[in-house]
Image: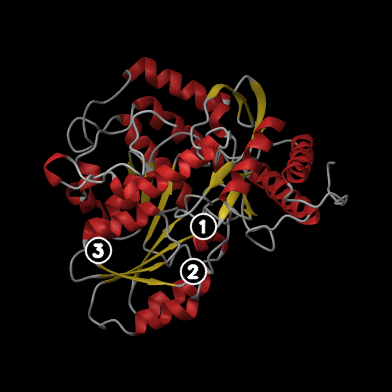
Amino acid sequence: MTEGISQPDQPETLEGGSKDLFSKFDDIIQMREGLLASGIEDPFNLVMEKVLSPTRAICNGRDTILLGTYNYMGMTFDPDVIDAGKQALADFGTGTTGSRVLNGTYQGHRECEEALKEFYAMDHAMVFSTGYLANLGIISTIAGKGDYIILDIDSHASIWDGCAMGNAEVVPFKHNDVEAMEKRLRRLPEDAGKLVILEGVYSMLGDVAPLKEMVAVAKKYGAMVLVDEAHSMGFIGENGRGVVEDAGVIDDVDFIIGTFSKSVGTVGGFCVSNHPKFEILRLVCRPYVFTASLPPSVVATAETSIRKLMHGHNKRAHLWENSKRLHKGLTQMGFELGTKEPQSAIVAVIMPDLEKGAMMWEALLKEGLYVNLARPPATPANMTLLRCSLCAEHSDEEVGTILGMFERAGKATGILGQTSDQSEGS
């Protein structure tokens, strides 16, 4: 048992009869304590004692292959990126101690925004302190009371939180269903403000949105379109601009949201746009105005990484090969995956339940492989997933090793049949 956490059989009221504000978490407390009581290592509290490269770290004293870090393009150890951060740290110090609208805009912030505008060929770019704040800020600022937000039911938590903060009317539709989206739009008042929010790649299953069809429908009903490209920037599209580029709709969307914590390899968020009034957001967007700006060393690494991603064709090609190989190998073993074909750098392996998923996660960790254990309510349809995030720096040998680890762990936990002999890399 974890010390300091109330047990489910304890009273849910405090002295004086007040409701225990933590009682709403009792189900999650029970779930966590049930896993720990079974002897499984806490899958939500892994410590990396030393990071060796974009694909390996020391976890619990063991050399571990990293397959759950979102470090898609492997930029975290790029020598040019590291040197840029060191130089900015020496030249500008450790932090700005202020927001962007006060003393928090340094030369590096402007240079990072210029790199984003060049990368996307857009007129405007705003850098936020995290990708979460980018969604929270842009969505809550442009869609408010009396407006409508039409969004995919499987949208990221930061998108839902941006909707709640802005107090717009939220109209969800079935995941990736173009017809369902159009039905919702058709019912809305013609003269109302409407914002359609989509994601290029959905982070749980790694599936891609049919943006070409969806953007066309949104424009048909006069809606603005915001696309979150957090999990496709740098990788998908000829120039790495995401699914909007790959689908040929980049000039038709109004806002693209992204993050630095995936392919860029650092931390931060951004929005790019061609909207002529976009710059006013710097004065009215609360999560931008009232948050300290990113440290100079962070924006320097981001700017350098973004400019290098413009020339990342070979890395993109290798990452696609890694994704295809892992997807094919796991399918041949008999694992159930989140997509029938590889659609992104995310390969989601569907587990029978949380207990089996945690057992499989631990078995893989003991093999020397780290993946994400994703559980409800973050996952669609109450699924438990082992979410694999491939990296352009994973070698062919590492992918083969990963497949062997999955087969051994799958057999050891009973998730795979003992007669499976079709795997690659075994």
**Amino acid type, label 1:** Tyr
| Label 3, label 2: how far apart the Cα atoms are | 21 Å
For image coordinates 52% across by 71% down, the residue present is: 212
Residue identified by numbered label 1: 202
**Image position of 411 with respect to 384: above or below:** above
Q: Nearer the viewer, residue 46 or 83?
A: 46
Q: Nearer the viewer, residue 424 or 223?
A: 424
- Horizontally, is 336 left or right of 38 in the view? right
**Amino acid type, label 3:** Ala
Where does residue 319 sit, x and y in percent of width and height?
67, 45
Where does residue 11 sit, x and y in percent of width and height?
26, 44
Residue identified by numbered label 3: 143
Where does residue 351 sit, x and y in percent of width and height?
63, 53
**Amino acid type, label 2:** His
Nearer to us: label 3 or label 2: 2
For image coordinates 69% across by 61% down, the residue present is: 341
Q: Nearer the viewer, residue 324 or 92?
A: 324
Q: Is residue 244 visible?
A: no
Contact between marks 1 and 2 (CB within 8 A): the answer is yes
For image coordinates 28% across by 34% down, the residue present is: 293
| Residue furthest left as drawn | 16
Lower sequence index among marks 1 and 2: 2
Residue identified by numbered label 2: 175
Mark 2 burial class by Cα count in 10 Å: few <14, some 14-19, many 20+:
some
Q: Secondary structure at mark 1?
A: loop
Quarter of the picture holding the C terminus: top right
Please name the colour scheme applied to the rendered image: secondary structure
Q: Secondary structure at mark 2?
A: loop
Q: Where, by quadrant of the figure, is residue 180 drawn?
A: bottom left
Mark 3 burial class by Cα count in 10 Å: few <14, some 14-19, many 20+:
many
**Image position of 334 with respect to 222: above or below:** above
